[in-house]
Image (tube, coloured by chain):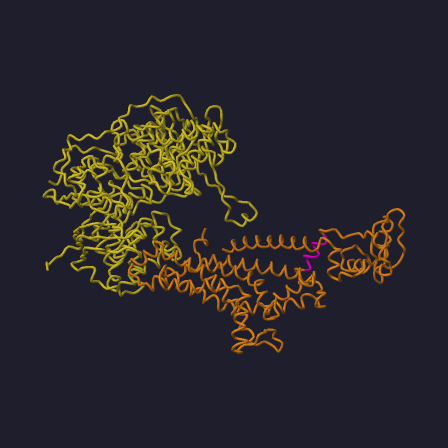
Chain colours: A yellow, B orange
Amino acid sequence: MSTNPPLLEIKNLNVSYHTRKGDVPAVIDFNLTLNAGESVGLVGESGCGKSTVSLALMRYMGNNGSISGGQVFFMGRDMATFSNEELRALRGSKIAMIYQEPFAALNPCMTIGKQLLEVPLTHEDISESEAKARTLQLLDDVRLPDPQRIIESYPHQLSGGQQQRVVIAMALLSNPKLLLLDEPTTALDVTVEAAIVNIVRDISKKYGTAMIYVSHNMGLILKTCERVAVMYSGQVIEEGKVQDIFVNSRHPYTRGLFRCIPNITADKNSRPLSPIRGQLPLATNRPKGCYFGPRCDFFEEEKCGKDLIPISVADSNGQRVRCTRWQEIDWDNYHPEVNQREKAAIGETLVQVRDVKKTYELPSESPLGLFGGGKREVKAVQDLSFEAKRKEIVAIVGESGCGKSTFAKVLMGLEGGSGGSIVMGNEDLAVLPVGDRTSETIAAVQMIFQNPNDTLNPTHSVGAQIARSIRKLGAASGEDVERKVDSLLDLVKLPRSYKNYKPSQLSGGQKQRIGIARAFAGRANLIVADEPVSALDVSVQAAVIDLLLDIQAKNDTTLLFISHDLSLVRYLADRIIVMYLGRIMEQGQTKDIFAPPYHPYTEALLSAVPIADHRIEKEEIILEGELPSAINPPPGCPFSSRCPRKIEGVCDKELPPKRVFPDGHEIYCHIEEQELKKMQPVFRMIEKVQTTA
Amino acid sequence: MLLLILRRFSVLVLTMLAMSLMVFAVLETNPEGLARKAIGQFSTVAQRTAWLARENYYVSVSDAEEKVAFEEKGYVTFSVNEGDWLIAHAPEEGVVYPDKKISEMVDDEVNVIRALQVPMAKRYVTWLGKFVVGDFGYSYRYKVPVSKVLWPRLLETGKLIALVLLFMIPLSLLLGVLAGMREGSFQDRAFSFISIMTTSVPEFASAVLLAAVFVFWLGWLPGTSSMSSGFSWAEMVLPVTVVTLYATGYIARITRASMAEVMRSHFIRTARLKGLSRRQVIMRHALRNALITPVTAILLQIPWLLSGVIVVEYFFAYKGFGTLLWEAINNTDPFLIEACAMVSVVVVVTSQLIMDVLYIYINPRIRFQ
């Protein structure tokens, strides 16, 4: 026995789930060695087994999961030999976990304090007051304001970011040796995410905790981890030091994944995405040989299509790759086909939005509320003005609660506006609910929704659903409908036979293609896409975006793209509107938004985006405080409560003036134009990249 | 908190008013029919008119000056009782009202009396006012004021329901929690089987079955529960058991579903991965969350029990609210029916209020929103 075993050693771990169709392997041949204080990332798309690995380490796999092979050594001891009591003593004490959805992870009926105190009281023989003191200290460490108030609160009284900090504090309370983070920031806004990631990094340094960071986001892994393992369909297909993987990835999947991620410094014309073709294989239906084979450009039946591919060491740096052909591939001469686009000529104005307001009324909390008096107002959208031209892609970005989706509802006529106008042609859409619109107007303004799983009726075939849209929008009638359905399926590059399928038989990406087909069923002039790809995996996302852009260009459609993803917006938008708490902060051409002068909020937002590119260095701006509620926004500039450049006594009193820069670039800020122009760019390219080799 | 209760309460008062309007509309808008129900199918028109006048459905005066004032306006007056005069509209042409007491008139003549009705709104207000102070009128079946018979009967049923709840709540929650704790396990299947079985046998069937076994075969228990010689525990056993069995299965099913859902939730995983034992996880984390739904269901059971016990009370000749309602309807005893309906409304609405308050108490998410 070695004198100093690694903290965690996983040897040939296999995990399967028992289903009616037999055992389905979820994790295959997983190996990992982790020393104290190290951090390793597990990255991959949905269903690749990354979360299963972390739960398997806790030996917690629900009713139908089990470890079907391999060993896990924790501090030198095989975890299979742990008794139930010993496992319990380990969980939450030596190994702790941080979860994806903090709200779901906390007991809604128990105060935060009770839930936190449980950890030390269960694992250690200490008094309650001692435990409480430590809990308060940790809440302070995770930068939660007023810990005393927090421990008396219930989970629903905290914001998402605060809840996640509580979960982090809970994980750290017993000073664990190993911290498992399962997509800890996926449910959070990007500025909150940046703050959480910083906390995790600082704390693991402070306490010397080893981390396994599970994420689908390459950018986050780059920011947080030293080593990374890329997973695909249950297998690790490549692993090594993070820098090496970014600079010199050897597996075709890893390379493909990087080409699918929009880069914050480039747009669709200068660096088009190249999607990985095909779909992720289902766990029940994996191909023979290499699981990535059917989607790989270097697939050779002889070498890749026969046996399971073993993982092999690629260099002295410990980079390992699960590919039989990695030495043969000449990456320098590999240029996958990409959809090269010319910058489209933008037409005349199509929609003119002026001073749109949307106010919701809430019943009052005062006794007057009984009689309908003393109503409170939520100003979801205020004074929104912009115009969208024909063929233009206008993006609205902002974090949750900024009013971007509310505006989409007003535009679609699902909700009446409270003021202002949205003029398209000779109609004012702001005062025209969808029920009063003619079918031409309805066909002209269509929407693509965020979650394709919820927007298709599960009991009807997709063909019938497209046909219904075609008839409703008056695009065709009688026998022409069938032909139109076929042509729409062609348009979204799905086989015509799919029209007989039920939505449950399609993958997420395919469902979203149906959503796109539906939106284009009539002659749409304006398509509102509300986070159309945020529910999709990266490799699928690129293909759907590519398709959407193609159709948009071909049909001369104006696209209003609502998103929180700045990299994506940078990639595809012509113009960007940045919103915060219902108000426009900044708007202008995409290139102007991504270069100084910035609005301080845009600057912070850009700085918060995790970037999957090791060559880019960026300014770190961490926003303090919580996103204020729209019921009770700060007076003056809505961003004043969190703004690092706030001018005391001005910003929190008056609404900021509009500062106008060339090319229709507008910033709403109290800071003088000259001062704004002095801002430094958030992103810098590092000239020379050093690998660890 | 207080505000919330106040708000709920005002909604409930409105509900009660709406319900009282409906009861009034169904039973009180046709005075002639009401009189038939009260004093019998074979009463004479004269008797009914006299009754209606006495019960203030028709305008009658006892003051001689008022009588004259009406006559000057063109109304006709009849003497109803000693010193009371009924006010009627002027007769149609060719018809002469003889100046007689109503009771002395023959039916044909009185058919043309168009007695002046008290306006509906005014009647509703006095009717409701009487209910509020507990004056429910007279029961023609029991020949006593309604309140004399209603309250004791309600108390009897209250005892029955209390005993049922006493056994049903712990039993059903226990069954449900044990079943939902491990979804799909043998334990789950076994307890689920028991609860489905008890709730799928209707009360009249289980009453017959239990009576056959314990009364006729074993002879351990009395077959009727009329409590003719004072309160007897032995007579309570069968009615309580029958209702408990039926209600338990239902609540246990709801509890099981709620528990199973909670056990699948992420915060249970969090608690497990904190290193808590299974017992701690269930006692501290699962139970309270799992009980929110069944508590609501249990309180919804109370109004159901109030009328749901009719079968059992009737079967065992238990003198409770259920049998009272049954007899009131059978004998078309109008004021008793009205009183029973209004009492039911009050019980339903009150249990709703209790449910709301309890819900706020057990579910912190409501309290602060």
Q: Residue at x 80, y 52 (%)?
A: B116
Q: Position of residue A566 (x, y in %)?
A: 31, 35
Regarding residue B171, the answer to whether it shows in the image is: yes
Q: Quadrant of residue B277?
A: bottom left
Along the line of sight, the residue nearer the viewer: B133 or B259: B259
Q: Quadrant of the image for the N terminus of chain A?
A: bottom left
**Which residue sits at x=73%, y=57%?**
B34
Q: Position of residue B217 (x, y in %)?
A: 52, 76
User: Is A624 located above or below residue A555 in the figure?
Assistant: below
Tell me: B230 left or right of A554: right
Is residue B323 on the magenta stretch? no
Identify the image quadrant of residue A512. Answer: top left
Q: Is residue B123 magenta?
A: yes
In front of the other: A612 or A604 = A612
Magenta residues (range): B122-130
- SS assignment for the magenta stretch, majority: helix
Q: Position of residue A686 (x, y in %)?
A: 18, 34
Quadrant where the C terminus of chain A lies?
Answer: top left
In this rendered view, identify the residue nearer to me: A96 or A472: A472
Residue A137 visible to the viewer: no
Residue A682 position within the rendered picture, expressed as x and y whole percent measured from the top left: 26, 34
- Please identify the quarter of the rendering in which residue A658 is found: top left
Q: Depth check: give the residue in front, A59 or B328.
A: B328
Looking at the rendered structure, the number of numbered marks drawn on it comes to 0
